[in-house]
Amino acid sequence: MSQFIKGRGAQKKVHSRFLKHEHQVLDEYLNFCEIEGELADKNKTKYIDVHPKTFVNKVDSPDVGIEYSANPYQGCEHGCVYCYARNSHEYWGYGAGVDFERFILVKKNAPELLQKKLRSRNWKGDTIIFSGNTDCYQPIERKLEITRACLKMMYKWKNPTGIITKNSLILRDLDILKDLAHLDLVRVSISINTLSEETRRLLEPRTSSIKNRLKAVEILSANGIPVNVMLAPIIPSLNCHEIIPLIKKVANLGALSVAYIIVRLNGQVATIFEDWAHKSIPGKADRILNQIKQCHDGKLNDSTWGRRMKGSGVIARQISDTIALARAKYLKGKRMPKLDNSHYLKCKDPQLKLF
């Protein structure tokens, strides 16, 4: 535990599989580097401007339920140790471990690129999900407001909008969300996988507290914004016992639906998660890892379409049955509304307003 990196999910640096060489600063050098009398901060987050040519991405995965995603940031300071998106950081030349949390790529031209997409001749007003890869409301958003600018653009063009986040910072944009909701143009998914702050701090060290996320569910719902709660991921022997009380809680706060994913440790995430488990929860690590394998045909990850998210085997069926029971008891008769893209079509072609 003496080597535990405070405030981070991943507890090790993982070399990118796409790079032959890597840069590494020796600890012996850092020990001589002092800033105002203190040792140089090896754990400081760095924000790097990038200038992509496109912003809206087509999602080809058939079992994700998303057609298009948009990510104002790559990498995520939230530091969720289980995050599947860690592997995508390797395509940018960084590692999936602590690099994913320390090096955040910022797309300041995202609003302009978004408008270009919304104005394009072939765009038909399909729903765009913000945070298909990394959280659009991670800490730096409070300062940069890139996501807020994008939401303004979505409302300007009346395009259907989806948001997935685990940060209560979303409440800052309540004004825009209410405008979107008035036209059936928005739905929000708040990710909550535990009611325990102790578990949250271990799994997701720089996310909003559970209390604040529950508050976000309540306030958004009270303002007519449809809220789905993502129980993601469910980790056997760690948070699976919380399914029923969690669904009861969010249903009472106004959530219209819940969805879930069983943890799957794809690519480098398996190495990162195993290392984290043995350092963070050594007494439970082997049991948790073995039960994750039982959900994925003896492996830590199953990439089979249609099965990879929900798992297979006895434990996966128990989780599925528990979810179904809680939905039937606490969410009966509730459902997320369908988004309306007719406003976009009229906005894009004013002639349609005549009909």
Image (cartoon, helix red, strand yellow):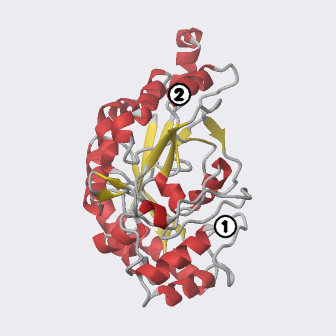
Residue denoted by label 1: 267
Quadrant, the C terminus: top right
- Which residue is rendered at x = 48% and y = 83% of the image? 278
Q: SS for tag 1?
A: loop
Q: SS for tag 2?
A: loop
Residue 214 disc label: none
Rendered view: 161 above or below 231: above
Q: Position of residue 25 (x, y in %)?
A: 53, 59
Residue denoted by label 2: 109
- Which residue is rendered at x = 48% and y = 56% of the image? 101
- Which residue is rendered at x = 56% and y = 71% of the image? 272
C-alpha separation, residue under disc 1 versus residue under disc 2 = 30 Å
- Asked where in the image residue 345 lies, by quadrant, the reply is top right
- Asked where in the image residue 125 lies, by quadrant, the reply is top right
- Asked where in the image residue 316 lies, by quadrant, the reply is bottom right
Q: Position of residue 173 (x, y in %)?
A: 33, 36
Tell which residue pokes out farthest to the front in this image: 32
55 relative position to 231: left or right? right
Is 276 in front, or is 26?
Answer: 26
Q: Identity of the amino acid at label 2?
A: Asn
Q: Position of residue 152 (x, y in %)?
A: 42, 26
Is 50 in front, or is 169?
Answer: 50
175 relative position to 352: left or right? left
Q: Residues within 10 Å of mark 2 (few under 14, many from 20)?
A: some
Q: Residues within 10 Å of mark 1 (few under 14, many from 20)?
A: some
